[in-house]
Image (tube, rainbow, N blue to C red):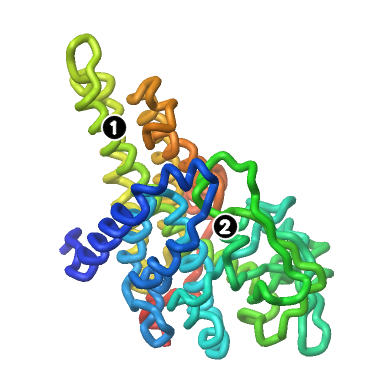
Amino acid sequence: MLNFDLTEEQRLLEQSVREWAGREVAPRIRELDRAHTFDRGILPQMAELGLLGISVPTQYGGAGMDYICLGLASEELEYVDTSLRVIMSVHVGLNSLTLLSWGTEDQKQRYLVPQAQGKKIATYGLTEPSAGSDARGIQTVAIKKGDRYELTGEKMWISLADVADNFLVFAWSDLEKKKQRDPSGMSAFIVERSFKGFSSGTLTEKWGILAGNTGFFKMDCVEVPAENLVGEEGEGFKIAMFALDQGRYTVAAGATGLIRACRDASVNYARQRKTFGVEIGSHQLIKELIAQMESDYQASRLLWQRAGWLKNDGRRNTRETGLAKWFSTVASERAAGDAVQIHGANGYSDEYPVGRFYRNCKGAVIYEGTREIHKIMQADYLLGYRNDKPTRCDLPAWEIR
Protein backbone atom coordinates (compact mmCIF):
# COMPACT_ATOMS: atom_id res chain seq x y z
CA MET A 1 0.00 0.00 0.00
CA LEU A 2 1.30 3.45 -0.90
CA ASN A 3 2.02 5.76 2.00
CA PHE A 4 2.97 9.36 1.31
CA ASP A 5 3.33 10.31 4.98
CA LEU A 6 6.78 11.35 6.15
CA THR A 7 8.43 9.42 8.95
CA GLU A 8 9.05 11.13 12.26
CA GLU A 9 12.73 11.56 11.37
CA GLN A 10 11.85 13.09 8.02
CA ARG A 11 9.33 15.50 9.56
CA LEU A 12 11.81 16.63 12.20
CA LEU A 13 14.50 17.15 9.58
CA GLU A 14 12.15 19.16 7.37
CA GLN A 15 11.08 21.31 10.31
CA SER A 16 14.60 21.95 11.60
CA VAL A 17 15.94 22.98 8.20
CA ARG A 18 12.92 25.21 7.57
CA GLU A 19 13.32 26.94 10.92
CA TRP A 20 17.09 27.39 10.60
CA ALA A 21 16.99 28.76 7.06
CA GLY A 22 14.07 31.03 7.88
CA ARG A 23 15.74 32.36 11.03
CA GLU A 24 19.41 32.58 10.07
CA VAL A 25 19.46 33.19 6.30
CA ALA A 26 16.13 34.55 5.07
CA PRO A 27 16.44 37.91 6.86
CA ARG A 28 19.86 38.53 5.24
CA ILE A 29 19.50 36.96 1.82
CA ARG A 30 18.50 40.10 -0.06
CA GLU A 31 21.58 41.94 1.18
CA LEU A 32 23.85 39.00 0.35
CA ASP A 33 22.31 38.79 -3.11
CA ARG A 34 22.69 42.51 -3.73
CA ALA A 35 26.31 42.42 -2.60
CA HIS A 36 27.10 39.33 -4.72
CA THR A 37 28.51 37.83 -1.53
CA PHE A 38 28.73 34.22 -0.41
CA ASP A 39 28.56 33.94 3.37
CA ARG A 40 31.06 31.28 4.40
CA GLY A 41 29.63 31.39 7.91
CA ILE A 42 26.65 29.43 6.60
CA LEU A 43 28.78 26.32 6.12
CA PRO A 44 29.62 25.56 9.78
CA GLN A 45 25.96 26.07 10.67
CA MET A 46 24.93 23.58 7.99
CA ALA A 47 27.56 21.18 9.30
CA GLU A 48 26.18 21.50 12.83
CA LEU A 49 22.74 20.57 11.51
CA GLY A 50 24.27 17.49 9.86
CA LEU A 51 23.35 18.69 6.38
CA LEU A 52 26.84 18.42 4.87
CA GLY A 53 26.83 14.68 5.47
CA ILE A 54 23.10 14.10 5.55
CA SER A 55 22.96 10.83 3.55
CA VAL A 56 26.47 9.63 4.36
CA PRO A 57 26.60 6.67 6.80
CA THR A 58 27.52 7.46 10.39
CA GLN A 59 30.61 5.30 10.08
CA TYR A 60 31.97 7.91 7.64
CA GLY A 61 31.03 10.90 9.75
CA GLY A 62 27.59 11.51 8.26
CA ALA A 63 24.07 11.70 9.65
CA GLY A 64 23.01 8.40 8.04
CA MET A 65 19.67 9.76 6.82
CA ASP A 66 17.87 8.51 3.73
CA TYR A 67 17.44 10.13 0.32
CA ILE A 68 14.01 11.53 1.16
CA CYS A 69 15.69 13.55 3.90
CA LEU A 70 18.24 14.79 1.37
CA GLY A 71 15.39 15.89 -0.90
CA LEU A 72 13.49 17.56 1.93
CA ALA A 73 16.57 19.51 2.98
CA SER A 74 17.20 20.60 -0.61
CA GLU A 75 13.59 21.77 -0.99
CA GLU A 76 13.62 23.75 2.24
CA LEU A 77 16.96 25.39 1.47
CA GLU A 78 15.96 26.55 -2.00
CA TYR A 79 12.69 27.86 -0.59
CA VAL A 80 14.89 30.54 1.00
CA ASP A 81 17.51 30.83 -1.75
CA THR A 82 19.00 28.71 -4.51
CA SER A 83 22.54 29.38 -3.27
CA LEU A 84 21.84 27.24 -0.18
CA ARG A 85 20.64 24.27 -2.19
CA VAL A 86 23.63 24.50 -4.53
CA ILE A 87 25.85 23.67 -1.56
CA MET A 88 23.93 20.42 -1.10
CA SER A 89 24.14 19.62 -4.81
CA VAL A 90 27.89 19.91 -5.21
CA HIS A 91 29.21 19.05 -1.76
CA VAL A 92 26.84 16.19 -0.92
CA GLY A 93 25.33 14.99 -4.20
CA LEU A 94 28.02 15.36 -6.80
CA ASN A 95 31.06 14.78 -4.60
CA SER A 96 30.51 13.03 -1.27
CA LEU A 97 27.89 10.48 -2.37
CA THR A 98 30.07 9.67 -5.37
CA LEU A 99 33.09 9.03 -3.14
CA LEU A 100 30.87 6.88 -0.94
CA SER A 101 30.09 4.60 -3.87
CA TRP A 102 33.30 4.72 -5.89
CA GLY A 103 36.05 5.69 -3.46
CA THR A 104 38.52 3.37 -1.80
CA GLU A 105 38.43 2.94 1.96
CA ASP A 106 41.51 5.11 2.19
CA GLN A 107 39.84 7.86 0.14
CA LYS A 108 36.75 7.68 2.32
CA GLN A 109 38.81 8.10 5.47
CA ARG A 110 40.95 10.91 4.09
CA TYR A 111 38.28 12.85 2.20
CA LEU A 112 34.72 11.63 2.79
CA VAL A 113 34.86 11.69 6.59
CA PRO A 114 36.01 15.32 6.94
CA GLN A 115 33.57 16.36 4.19
CA ALA A 116 30.63 14.69 5.91
CA GLN A 117 31.63 16.40 9.16
CA GLY A 118 31.87 19.76 7.40
CA LYS A 119 35.55 20.15 8.19
CA LYS A 120 36.31 20.21 4.46
CA ILE A 121 34.16 21.52 1.62
CA ALA A 122 34.00 19.73 -1.71
CA THR A 123 32.80 20.30 -5.25
CA TYR A 124 32.75 18.75 -8.74
CA GLY A 125 34.73 19.61 -11.86
CA LEU A 126 33.42 18.37 -15.21
CA THR A 127 32.29 21.44 -17.20
CA GLU A 128 34.91 23.35 -19.18
CA PRO A 129 34.91 26.50 -21.32
CA SER A 130 34.33 24.37 -24.42
CA ALA A 131 32.44 21.43 -22.90
CA GLY A 132 29.09 21.46 -21.10
CA SER A 133 26.40 19.06 -22.29
CA ASP A 134 29.05 17.43 -24.47
CA ALA A 135 31.08 15.86 -21.67
CA ARG A 136 33.29 14.07 -24.19
CA GLY A 137 34.48 17.46 -25.33
CA ILE A 138 36.54 18.15 -22.21
CA GLN A 139 40.19 18.97 -22.86
CA THR A 140 41.74 18.38 -19.43
CA VAL A 141 44.36 15.64 -19.52
CA ALA A 142 45.98 13.44 -16.89
CA ILE A 143 49.43 12.08 -17.77
CA LYS A 144 50.67 9.13 -15.70
CA LYS A 145 54.20 9.69 -14.41
CA GLY A 146 55.33 6.94 -12.05
CA ASP A 147 53.21 6.99 -8.93
CA ARG A 148 51.53 10.27 -9.89
CA TYR A 149 49.30 11.84 -12.50
CA GLU A 150 49.98 15.28 -13.92
CA LEU A 151 46.73 17.16 -14.59
CA THR A 152 46.49 20.13 -16.90
CA GLY A 153 43.31 21.94 -17.90
CA GLU A 154 40.61 24.40 -16.88
CA LYS A 155 37.14 23.87 -15.43
CA MET A 156 34.39 26.48 -15.72
CA TRP A 157 31.06 27.26 -14.03
CA ILE A 158 32.13 25.45 -10.87
CA SER A 159 29.99 26.04 -7.79
CA LEU A 160 32.11 26.79 -4.70
CA ALA A 161 35.19 27.11 -6.91
CA ASP A 162 36.77 29.66 -4.56
CA VAL A 163 35.46 27.98 -1.40
CA ALA A 164 36.01 24.22 -1.77
CA ASP A 165 39.00 22.35 -0.37
CA ASN A 166 38.56 19.18 -2.44
CA PHE A 167 37.61 18.77 -6.09
CA LEU A 168 36.36 15.69 -7.96
CA VAL A 169 37.98 16.26 -11.35
CA PHE A 170 37.50 14.47 -14.67
CA ALA A 171 40.24 14.23 -17.28
CA TRP A 172 41.43 12.18 -20.23
CA SER A 173 43.97 9.60 -19.03
CA ASP A 174 44.16 7.93 -22.47
CA LEU A 175 45.11 10.46 -25.14
CA GLU A 176 44.41 8.09 -28.04
CA LYS A 177 40.87 7.56 -26.83
CA LYS A 178 40.60 11.32 -26.38
CA LYS A 179 41.20 11.71 -30.12
CA GLN A 180 38.43 9.18 -30.78
CA ARG A 181 36.14 10.78 -28.17
CA ASP A 182 35.87 7.36 -26.54
CA PRO A 183 34.60 7.97 -22.98
CA SER A 184 36.38 4.87 -21.70
CA GLY A 185 39.53 7.00 -21.85
CA MET A 186 38.38 9.31 -19.05
CA SER A 187 39.31 8.99 -15.39
CA ALA A 188 38.33 10.69 -12.14
CA PHE A 189 40.65 12.21 -9.55
CA ILE A 190 40.52 13.90 -6.16
CA VAL A 191 42.42 17.17 -6.35
CA GLU A 192 43.17 19.30 -3.32
CA ARG A 193 43.30 23.08 -3.46
CA SER A 194 46.71 22.91 -1.78
CA PHE A 195 48.29 21.00 -4.68
CA LYS A 196 50.96 23.03 -6.47
CA GLY A 197 49.80 24.45 -9.80
CA PHE A 198 46.15 24.74 -8.76
CA SER A 199 44.42 28.14 -8.92
CA SER A 200 40.83 29.35 -8.91
CA GLY A 201 38.76 32.46 -9.48
CA THR A 202 35.21 33.77 -9.11
CA LEU A 203 32.86 34.64 -11.96
CA THR A 204 31.50 38.12 -11.32
CA GLU A 205 29.32 38.70 -14.38
CA LYS A 206 26.57 36.13 -13.72
CA TRP A 207 23.06 37.49 -13.11
CA GLY A 208 21.58 34.75 -10.97
CA ILE A 209 22.37 32.95 -7.69
CA LEU A 210 24.33 36.01 -6.65
CA ALA A 211 24.58 34.90 -3.01
CA GLY A 212 26.44 31.79 -4.16
CA ASN A 213 30.05 31.32 -5.20
CA THR A 214 30.55 30.27 -8.83
CA GLY A 215 33.86 30.30 -10.63
CA PHE A 216 36.59 28.42 -12.41
CA PHE A 217 39.79 26.62 -11.56
CA LYS A 218 42.93 25.93 -13.51
CA MET A 219 45.46 23.14 -13.20
CA ASP A 220 48.94 23.75 -14.53
CA CYS A 221 50.80 20.44 -14.34
CA VAL A 222 49.19 19.63 -10.99
CA GLU A 223 50.70 16.47 -9.53
CA VAL A 224 48.04 14.16 -8.11
CA PRO A 225 49.05 10.98 -6.22
CA ALA A 226 47.96 7.75 -7.89
CA GLU A 227 46.01 6.86 -4.76
CA ASN A 228 43.72 9.79 -5.57
CA LEU A 229 42.46 8.06 -8.70
CA VAL A 230 38.75 7.37 -8.06
CA GLY A 231 37.66 3.99 -9.40
CA GLU A 232 39.80 2.46 -12.11
CA GLU A 233 41.43 4.17 -15.05
CA GLY A 234 38.81 4.59 -17.76
CA GLU A 235 35.84 4.69 -15.37
CA GLY A 236 35.70 8.48 -15.20
CA PHE A 237 32.73 8.92 -17.53
CA LYS A 238 30.68 6.33 -15.63
CA ILE A 239 31.55 8.04 -12.36
CA ALA A 240 30.62 11.45 -13.76
CA MET A 241 27.21 10.18 -14.86
CA PHE A 242 26.65 8.44 -11.51
CA ALA A 243 27.44 11.72 -9.74
CA LEU A 244 24.93 13.56 -11.91
CA ASP A 245 22.19 11.17 -10.77
CA GLN A 246 22.80 12.36 -7.21
CA GLY A 247 23.20 16.03 -8.09
CA ARG A 248 20.12 16.14 -10.32
CA TYR A 249 18.06 14.72 -7.50
CA THR A 250 18.91 17.65 -5.24
CA VAL A 251 18.28 20.08 -8.12
CA ALA A 252 14.80 18.58 -8.66
CA ALA A 253 13.90 18.81 -4.98
CA GLY A 254 15.35 22.32 -4.78
CA ALA A 255 13.38 23.57 -7.79
CA THR A 256 10.28 22.22 -6.07
CA GLY A 257 11.07 24.47 -3.12
CA LEU A 258 11.43 27.45 -5.45
CA ILE A 259 7.99 26.75 -6.93
CA ARG A 260 6.55 26.73 -3.42
CA ALA A 261 8.31 30.02 -2.63
CA CYS A 262 6.80 31.58 -5.77
CA ARG A 263 3.37 30.23 -4.85
CA ASP A 264 3.48 31.53 -1.29
CA ALA A 265 4.77 34.95 -2.31
CA SER A 266 2.08 35.21 -4.98
CA VAL A 267 -0.73 34.15 -2.64
CA ASN A 268 0.36 36.69 -0.03
CA TYR A 269 0.61 39.48 -2.56
CA ALA A 270 -2.71 38.59 -4.22
CA ARG A 271 -4.44 38.93 -0.85
CA GLN A 272 -2.87 42.32 -0.12
CA ARG A 273 -2.87 44.09 -3.47
CA LYS A 274 -6.11 45.64 -4.69
CA THR A 275 -7.14 46.77 -8.16
CA PHE A 276 -10.54 48.00 -9.29
CA GLY A 277 -11.58 47.99 -5.66
CA VAL A 278 -10.95 44.29 -4.96
CA GLU A 279 -8.06 41.98 -4.05
CA ILE A 280 -6.26 40.87 -7.21
CA GLY A 281 -6.65 37.31 -5.99
CA SER A 282 -10.32 37.54 -6.88
CA HIS A 283 -9.47 38.04 -10.56
CA GLN A 284 -9.81 34.86 -12.59
CA LEU A 285 -6.50 35.11 -14.44
CA ILE A 286 -4.55 35.58 -11.18
CA LYS A 287 -6.27 32.49 -9.81
CA GLU A 288 -5.25 30.58 -12.91
CA LEU A 289 -1.57 31.46 -12.43
CA ILE A 290 -1.61 30.52 -8.75
CA ALA A 291 -3.45 27.26 -9.46
CA GLN A 292 -0.75 26.34 -12.01
CA MET A 293 1.92 26.89 -9.37
CA GLU A 294 0.13 24.57 -6.97
CA SER A 295 -0.27 21.90 -9.65
CA ASP A 296 3.41 22.16 -10.60
CA TYR A 297 4.49 22.05 -6.96
CA GLN A 298 2.54 18.91 -6.15
CA ALA A 299 3.65 17.12 -9.33
CA SER A 300 7.30 18.09 -8.82
CA ARG A 301 7.27 16.90 -5.23
CA LEU A 302 5.83 13.54 -6.21
CA LEU A 303 8.44 13.14 -8.95
CA TRP A 304 11.46 13.79 -6.75
CA GLN A 305 10.03 11.63 -3.98
CA ARG A 306 9.51 8.80 -6.47
CA ALA A 307 13.20 9.08 -7.43
CA GLY A 308 14.15 9.19 -3.76
CA TRP A 309 12.13 6.07 -3.03
CA LEU A 310 14.00 4.24 -5.78
CA LYS A 311 17.31 5.45 -4.35
CA ASN A 312 16.31 4.27 -0.90
CA ASP A 313 15.45 0.89 -2.40
CA GLY A 314 18.84 0.66 -4.11
CA ARG A 315 17.33 0.64 -7.60
CA ARG A 316 18.55 2.35 -10.76
CA ASN A 317 16.88 5.74 -11.04
CA THR A 318 18.57 7.68 -13.84
CA ARG A 319 15.34 7.86 -15.83
CA GLU A 320 13.16 8.92 -12.91
CA THR A 321 15.69 11.39 -11.52
CA GLY A 322 16.18 12.95 -14.95
CA LEU A 323 12.43 13.34 -15.39
CA ALA A 324 12.09 14.95 -11.97
CA LYS A 325 14.92 17.36 -12.70
CA TRP A 326 13.56 18.31 -16.11
CA PHE A 327 9.96 18.77 -15.02
CA SER A 328 10.61 20.66 -11.80
CA THR A 329 13.19 23.07 -13.19
CA VAL A 330 11.04 24.00 -16.19
CA ALA A 331 8.05 24.35 -13.85
CA SER A 332 10.07 26.57 -11.52
CA GLU A 333 10.92 28.85 -14.44
CA ARG A 334 7.22 29.09 -15.27
CA ALA A 335 6.30 29.74 -11.63
CA ALA A 336 8.91 32.46 -11.23
CA GLY A 337 7.81 34.22 -14.40
CA ASP A 338 4.18 34.09 -13.34
CA ALA A 339 5.05 35.30 -9.84
CA VAL A 340 6.70 38.38 -11.32
CA GLN A 341 3.63 38.90 -13.51
CA ILE A 342 1.29 38.68 -10.52
CA HIS A 343 3.37 41.29 -8.71
CA GLY A 344 3.17 43.58 -11.74
CA ALA A 345 5.55 46.54 -11.55
CA ASN A 346 6.49 45.51 -8.02
CA GLY A 347 7.71 42.20 -9.41
CA TYR A 348 10.31 44.20 -11.31
CA SER A 349 11.56 45.68 -8.03
CA ASP A 350 14.21 44.18 -5.81
CA GLU A 351 12.04 45.07 -2.83
CA TYR A 352 10.12 41.87 -3.49
CA PRO A 353 11.70 38.37 -3.62
CA VAL A 354 10.11 37.17 -6.86
CA GLY A 355 12.67 38.96 -9.03
CA ARG A 356 15.42 37.01 -7.27
CA PHE A 357 13.48 33.81 -7.78
CA TYR A 358 13.24 34.62 -11.49
CA ARG A 359 16.98 35.25 -11.76
CA ASN A 360 17.86 32.13 -9.80
CA CYS A 361 15.59 29.62 -11.51
CA LYS A 362 17.15 29.81 -14.96
CA GLY A 363 20.44 28.20 -14.01
CA ALA A 364 18.83 24.90 -13.06
CA VAL A 365 17.21 24.64 -16.50
CA ILE A 366 20.74 24.64 -17.91
CA TYR A 367 23.16 22.93 -15.52
CA GLU A 368 23.33 19.18 -14.83
CA GLY A 369 21.69 18.49 -18.18
CA THR A 370 19.79 21.15 -20.11
CA ARG A 371 16.06 20.74 -20.62
CA GLU A 372 16.83 19.75 -24.21
CA ILE A 373 19.19 16.98 -23.09
CA HIS A 374 16.57 15.66 -20.67
CA LYS A 375 13.88 15.73 -23.34
CA ILE A 376 16.07 13.61 -25.58
CA MET A 377 16.82 11.22 -22.71
CA GLN A 378 13.15 10.68 -21.90
CA ALA A 379 12.28 10.13 -25.56
CA ASP A 380 15.16 7.69 -25.94
CA TYR A 381 13.83 5.62 -23.03
CA LEU A 382 10.42 5.39 -24.69
CA LEU A 383 11.91 4.59 -28.09
CA GLY A 384 14.20 1.94 -26.65
CA TYR A 385 17.44 3.76 -27.45
CA ARG A 386 18.50 3.80 -23.78
CA ASN A 387 18.63 0.77 -21.52
CA ASP A 388 20.44 1.61 -18.31
CA LYS A 389 21.70 -1.44 -16.47
CA PRO A 390 22.19 -1.59 -12.69
CA THR A 391 25.73 -1.07 -11.43
CA ARG A 392 27.50 -2.10 -8.28
CA CYS A 393 26.91 1.43 -6.96
CA ASP A 394 23.12 1.34 -6.95
CA LEU A 395 22.82 0.77 -3.21
CA PRO A 396 21.21 2.99 -0.59
CA ALA A 397 23.96 5.32 0.59
CA TRP A 398 23.58 4.45 4.27
CA GLU A 399 23.76 0.69 3.55
CA ILE A 400 27.02 0.71 1.61
CA ARG A 401 29.74 -0.91 3.68
Foreground residue among 11 and 386: 11
Q: Quadrant of residue 171?
A: bottom right
Foreground residue among 197 and 104: 197
Position in image of residue 161 (x %, y %):
62, 61
* Crowd class of label 1 (few under 14; some 14 to 19; many from 20; radius 10 Å): many
Position in image of residue 399 (x %, y %):
37, 82
Secondary structure, mark 1, is helix
For image coordinates 49% across by 38% down, the residue present is 359
Q: Which residue is mark 2?
A: 159
The C terminus - image quarter: bottom left
**Which amino acid type is marked by label 1?**
Ser
Position in image of residue 22 (x %, y %):
30, 52
For image coordinates 41% across by 52% down, the residue present is 252
Determine whether label 1 and label 2 are within 8 Å by CB: no
Between the C-alphas of marks 1 and 2, the distance is: 30 Å
For image coordinates 37% across by 53% down, the residue present is 25
Disc ID at residue 140? none
Secondary structure, mark 2, is strand
For image coordinates 22% across by 9% down, the residue present is 276
Position in image of residue 122 (x %, y %):
55, 69
Q: Which residue is mark 1?
A: 266
Vertical comparison of 337 with 25: above or below: above
* Circle nearer the N terminus (1, 2): 2
* Crowd class of label 2 (few under 14; some 14 to 19; many from 20; radius 10 Å): many
Q: Quadrant of residue 296?
A: top left
**Which amino acid type is marked by label 2?**
Ser
Foreground residue among 67 and 268: 268
Q: Is residue 66 left or right of residue 32?
A: left
The N terminus - image quarter: bottom left
Q: Is residue 163 left or right of residue 138?
A: left
